Amino acid sequence: MAQYTRISGSVGLITLKNPPVNALSAVVRQGIVDSVERALGEPEVKCLVICGQSGKFCGGADIREFGKKMTGPPLIPVFHAIEAAAKPVVAAIEGIALGGGLELALGCHYRIAHSKAKLGLPEVTLGLLPAAAGSQRLPRLIGVPAALDLITTGRHVTAAEALQLGIVDQVTDHNTVDAAVKFALSVAGQSLDARRISTFPCPRLSNLDAVFEAAMQKVRQAARGAIAPIACVQAVRAAATLPYAQGLEREKELMATLFTSGQARALQYSFFAQRAVGRWSMPSGARWDTSKPKPIRKAAVIGLGTMGRGITVGLAQAGLSVVAVETQEKQLMEAKQAVSGMLERGAKKRGVSPPLGNISYSSNIKTVGDVDLVIEAVFEDMALKKEVFQQLSAVCRPGTFLCTNTSGLDIDDLASQTPNPELVVGMHFFAPAHVMKLLEVVYGPRSSPQAVATAMQLGKVIGKVSVAVGNCQGFVGNRMLSPYLSQANFLLEEGATPEFVDQVLEEFGFAMGAFRMSDLSGLDVGWRVRKAAGLVVPGQPARMRQGCRYSPLGDLLCEQGRFGQKTGSGWYQYDKPGSRVAKPDPWLHSFLEEYRTRHGLVARRIDHQEVLERCLYSLINEGFRILEEGIAAGPEDIDVIYVLGYSWPRHRGGPMFYADMVGLTRVLERLEFYHQAHPDVPSLQPCNLLRKLVASGSPPIHRWREVIKKVHSQL
Ligand SMILES: CC(C)(COP(=O)(O)OP(=O)(O)OC[C@H]1O[C@@H](n2cnc3c(N)ncnc32)[C@H](O)[C@@H]1OP(=O)(O)O)[C@@H](O)C(=O)NCCC(=O)NCCSC(=O)/C=C/CCCCCCCCCCCCC(=O)O
């Protein structure tokens, strides 16, 4: 609702009340309309202030209403009524003014912000544009280049930047509502002609075409197929070239296309999924709301390679005390220098001082005796990790949580090295660990709910989106990647090139195709895993392992020392080791031809659809297996992991959301088709849960959990 009160006799105060972020629901919009009408009708009221309850001005339109039938007054006329008011209306911005919240403020005559407030038009991140006249008012207020930046990126600005840009008129460190009331009284009775943004001409640009061409090029490059950023540029162009009323029409037209698009649905699903994963549960019944985390003040990181350094930076930046341990003195010195550099660069960006003093470095593992939690981040080798866990068990005080940063090793096997396996969880960070938002928190069968809650909470403290998943080879992310990569390899055997496969996957929206990604992360990583799994054994039939089809192509490249970017060649060639520009490699093409000849394979024409379906549907099928086994609690967990950790295009929601969009029947049919053609590839065999979902009428994704529950109860 919106509550109307009178203060200081002549000020009408409208307070938006819709926890948690005072979103502009139908009831709130109606409340604003009624309050404004009432204030304008009261002769004693000379001015109005609009604020939000609980220190939050407004988080924008109520996203939960988007999929439903529209009720209540639409936003644009509400904001026009405010702007047209004959009495000054001042927005008192505390906390947040985002999306429709900022558009509401732009409809007001003045804006006063608290110094800690954040403002922005993040609609683009939800597949939309600021269609409550924001795309038309903001450029008129701050000019085209700045408006383009804010609207196409959706970035939030601080109150200080908002003041500098001219979005707000005043910033206060004190009570914002008091400051707004005082301000409103000071301008009461003055002409408002120069305060109605919709009447402003858009500041002229001599190089208008060039500015919009550059903006369009920039968003197209970054968008990976997303349509909203492009519509945002078009809407701002309308503001710059058309009268306000016509600009509004264009804004509406563009919004109509976006509003009902699959991309908007996917992005809004993704928004809520990222929040839903915090409400984790385990098959044992343990849950986020019944498991209390222990506060972590001091942590240790063991092993200061690339991952350990990033984790140390993340912990120190979050204000924790960190003991950083590396047993090799030379490595320790190098790591100290690298970590300090990362902290200094990060602090410079944020305009704060680097938290160098939060870290103590040591080459002796015994120095971790008084920490609350340890993150072991040594080389991905089970024997080595086991040794470290045994040492940790001897030196850590009772109750210390022991976490391992591993991308797929058995958490329970490691836990068995300690007398307290309930204190052990996996924390799978993604490189670079201080930058990437994703953290897989992996619980083994003996991990206690408190250990999981603590790791999840620590993830939150260091700014990660943490997803709790069960213990299995590769956990969720890497396990699903395995069939995807296998299909990519099989496609090469059958006639495709790495360039073609990558092109198809990149057109779909991945930042990198399977082969460019493999070259970046290093072919030797998978080689080591396959060796450990006993797959790289000389003398075995070359293209079969354990009764299933196997492609040794990656192994053969590794045997040639082609590990990817770091060695200057892999699936592609590079100018020099470490170079990032992948070029098609004639050697690789001849190698593939020879390989096919050797194995009696006849290259055939493979089309776009086959690449996409085989790579994506095999990955999705594995996702269904993961849900069936209870390794992930719901499809949102998988989708968040893929969007944040594996560059799955956000505007496609995630693999499980994509399956829902394509249609489960279609996914099932195509998997059946490909499995029939490749009966020796078990990952193409549709899993039981997918069949059950289709048999239950392919319910929408938000109802899958009901079917999953039934499947689990039958086991
Ligand atoms: C920064 C935040 C606000 C707060 O962050 P934090 O403190 O970390 O808390 P969170 O965990 O993120 O959030 C807490 C809970 O609040 C929920 N939440 C947050 N924001 C909203 C919201 N805007 N609506 C609903 N719910 C919200 C959140 O989900 C959490 O709950 P839960 O855990 O999930 O249960 C942060 O939350 C944040 O960034 N929020 C989003 C801010 C944002 O993006 N705002 C913009 C919203 S879009 C908008 O404003 C659009 C405006 C223009 C609309 C014009 C509409 C015109 C329609 C015309 C249609 C024409 C087409 C017609 C087609 C046809 O012809 O049919």
Image: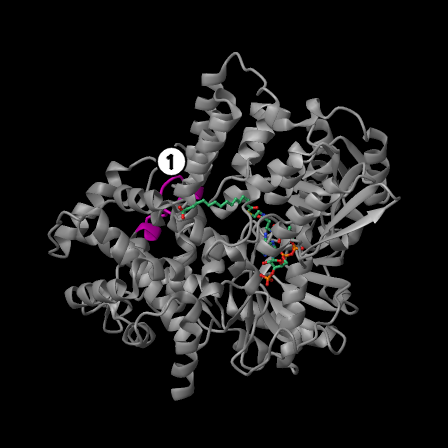
Q: Who is closer to the viewer here, 563 or 251?
A: 251
Residue type for callout 1 = Tyr
In the displayed structure image, the side of residue 569 where residue 394 appears, left or right: right
Q: Is residue 558 magenta?
A: yes
Which quadrant of the figure has residue 402? bottom right
Quick check: can you spot residue 254?
A: yes
Q: How is the image coloured?
A: one colour
Q: Is residue 219 above or below residue 391?
A: above
Q: In the image, residue 206 lies at what x, y percent? A: 52, 11
Quadrant in the picture for residue 290: bottom right
Number of dots carrying numbers: 1
Q: Residue furthest top?
A: 206
Image point 72% across, 36% down: which residue?
A: 348
The location of residue 151, given as percent across then percent down, is 55, 35
Residue 563 seen from this side: no
Is residue 389 shown above or below 76? below
Above-or-below relation of 98 to 190: below
Q: Nearer the viewer, residue 386 or 202?
A: 202
Farthest-out residue, right:
8
Start-end of magenta stretch: 557-570
Position of 669 with respect to 39 (left or right) is: left
- Determine which residue is flagged by label 1: 574
Position of residue 357 measured from the top left corner of the image (x, y, whole percent)? 81, 49
Categorize mark 1 by other alpha carbons within 10 Å: few (<14), some (14-19), many (20+): many
Quarter holding the C terminus is: bottom left
User: Which quarter of the image is occupied by the N terminus?
Assistant: bottom right
Queried whether the magenta region covers residue 630, the answer comes back as no
In the image, residue 273 lies at what x, y percent?
A: 51, 60
> Which residue is drawn at the image coordinates 78% and 63% (left, top)?
297
SS at mark 1 in the image: loop
